[in-house]
Structures are given as C-alpha cells and as structure tokens.
Amino acid sequence: MSAAREAGPAFGSAGARHLALADGWEAAWSGRDTRAFMSLCAPDLHYEDPVARAPLSGVAGLAAHAERLWRAFPDVVMRSAGERVADGRWLVLPTRVEGTNTGLLDGLPASHRRLGLHVIFWCELEPAGERLWRVRAFFDSHAAAVELGLLPRPGTLRNRAVLMLQGYGLWGGG
C-alpha cells in the first residue's frame, strides 16, 4: 500500500475517518450511484467545480450534477493521484479522473474522445468532522476542452486561425 493510501501523518489523528471519506468520495464518483453521496456529504453541502453551472447546494444538487456528468462520461473512473492531506477540518484530495465522452454535455454532441484530468478537491468538513460540507474541485478546464476537441490544440493551424480571428497576430506581421 502506498503512502497516498495509508492513514499516515498527513491524516493526523482522524486518519481512518478521513481515509474513509476520501475513498468513499472516489468510489461514489466511479460507482455512478447517487445514494453513495448521502453518507459522505452533509445535507447542506456546498459544491463548486468548473463545469457546474453555479454553486450547488445540498446532496440532491450534487447528485443531479453527477448524473449529468455520468450521462456524458458513462465509463468515468476517479482514482487517488497523490498524497491526501487532512487535519481535523480540511481534506485535500488529488485525483485522476478518466472517461470517454459518449453522451451529450450541455447540448454539445459527444466527441467520443478519452479525457484524463488531474482534479484537486479542496474539502471542508462539517463541524463534527464526519462528512464533507464544502467541496471545491479545481482542474484545467481549458486542457479538458482541448482534449475533447472543443478547442484547437496549441500550435496547430486551427489554433493560429482562432487567435487571428480574435485579433492576435494581425498587427505584428505574423
């Protein structure tokens, strides 16, 4: 078992409980079962990520968001991607999320491309320290859009054309 999976010093005195929350969070996203979030999250959960239309409130809001993403990426899997860090109130989860876009996402057609992202979840636990209360996900949404083919890869002719249409490169002679 790697250090990232053990309840070692980074987890302080609440190690086993924090490890269970971290493992449960990853399993809930990978398992595609919205009921799994119920035991992990406080009823008044506050959740944000770059593809959420707005900050989400409550477990039902998170569940609806998860279902939207699962429809777009039905094979999505989330795994630990580094050492988790926790104290009595905070939990930081570096993860790797992978899946294939085979369904609609916000009206965009499926790209049928594989997506692999590093995501950091910054979690505040409820005052009792038993469940997730405030969760923010951070990832490179631009890189995700490039991987899905929504934006051109940097350095390509398509990328240069888009930059030119936006006004870059028109005045410098190149």
Image (cartoon, rainbow, N blue to C red):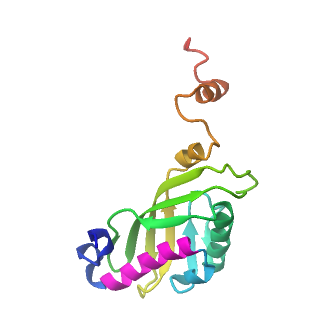
Q: Residue shown at 40%/82% (left/top)?
A: 20
Quadrant hosting residue 34: bottom right
**Is residue 173 depicted above or below 20 in this figure?**
above
* Percent coordinates x, y for residue 105 in the rendering: 70, 57
Q: In this view, does 51 lie above or below 130?
A: above
What x and y, as percent, mark residue 166? 65, 28
Query: How many numbered marks have been drawn onto this rendered protein structure?
Result: 0
Residue 58, percent from left and from top: 62, 78
Whether residue 15 sits left or right of residue 24 in the image: it is left
Identify which residue, 75 or 125, lies in the foreground.
75
Q: Does the magenta portion include 113? A: no
Please indicate whether residue 60 sits to the left or right of residue 20 in the image: right
Residue found 48% across the figure and 72% down from its top: 26
Residue located at (64% from left, 55% from top): 101
Q: Can residue 21 be found in the magenta stretch?
A: yes
**57 with respect to 26 (left or right):** right
Q: Nearer the viewer, residue 135 or 15?
A: 15
**Which quadrant is home to the C terminus?**
top right
Q: Residue furthest top?
A: 173
Residue furthest toward the left? Answer: 9
Q: In which quarter of the image is residue 173?
A: top right
What span is colored magenta in the figure? 15-31
Please tell me in which quadrant of the rendered image residue 11 appears. bottom left
x, y (%) of residue 83? Answer: 32, 66
